[in-house]
Image (spheres, grey):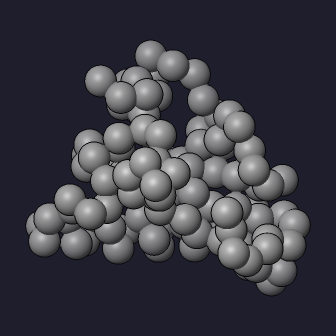
């Protein structure tokens, strides 16, 4: 069971900001920006590169949820960044698809 599955099951505490039947969103415990949230599907997809065609609606829901949360966190006007890591070189540390929402300060490019 991954760390995120344990958070979804309430076995590990998290500051949950959003939850619906498809996903959960909570604050990152090691924030890289003033606002750093994770949006995690309840379906355990290991990473974006192995998502299947039947995950298409879920993936769209995740992105729309990111936008909704960004508005609630007052990030829309100044801007924010959305990141999905895949594999070790991509910075993935938990093998459960998740979307990082970062904002609250200017974010430089390239990111790393």
Q: Is residue 105 left or right of residue 76?
A: right
User: Residue most toward the front?
Assistant: 89
Quadrant in which residue 75 is drawn:
bottom right
Percent position of residue 12, x then y: 51, 19
Q: Is residue 57 left or right of residue 82?
A: left
Q: Quadrant of the C terminus?
A: bottom right
Identity of the residue drawn at 47% across and 58% down: 90
Q: Is residue 72 visible?
A: no
Percent position of residue 66, x then y: 54, 66
Identity of the residue drawn at 57% across and 57% down: 100
Q: Is residue 73 left or right of residue 91?
A: right
Identity of the residue drawn at 80% across and 83% down: 77
Q: Nearer the viewer, residue 83 or 63?
A: 83
Q: Quadrant of the N terminus?
A: top left
Identity of the residue drawn at 14% across and 65% down: 52
Q: Is residue 43 visible?
A: yes
Quadrant in which residue 31 is drawn:
top right
Q: Nearer the viewer, residue 104 or 86?
A: 86
Percent position of residue 105, x then y: 87, 66
């Amino acid at each position: 069971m991954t760390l995120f599955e344990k958070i979804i099951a309430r076995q590990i505490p998290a500051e949950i900001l959003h939850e619906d039947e498809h996903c959960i969103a909570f604050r990152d415990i090691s924030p890289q920006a003033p606002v750093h949230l994770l949006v995690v599907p309840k379906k355990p997809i290991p990473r974006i590169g192995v998502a299947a065609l039947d995950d298409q609606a879920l993936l769209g829901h995740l992105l729309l949820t990111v936008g909704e949360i960004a508005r609630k966190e007052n990030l829309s006007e100044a801007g924010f960044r959305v990141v999905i890591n895949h594999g070790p070189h991509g910075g993935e540390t938990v093998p459960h698809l998740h979307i990082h929402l970062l904002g609250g300060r200017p974010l430089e490019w390239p990111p790393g």
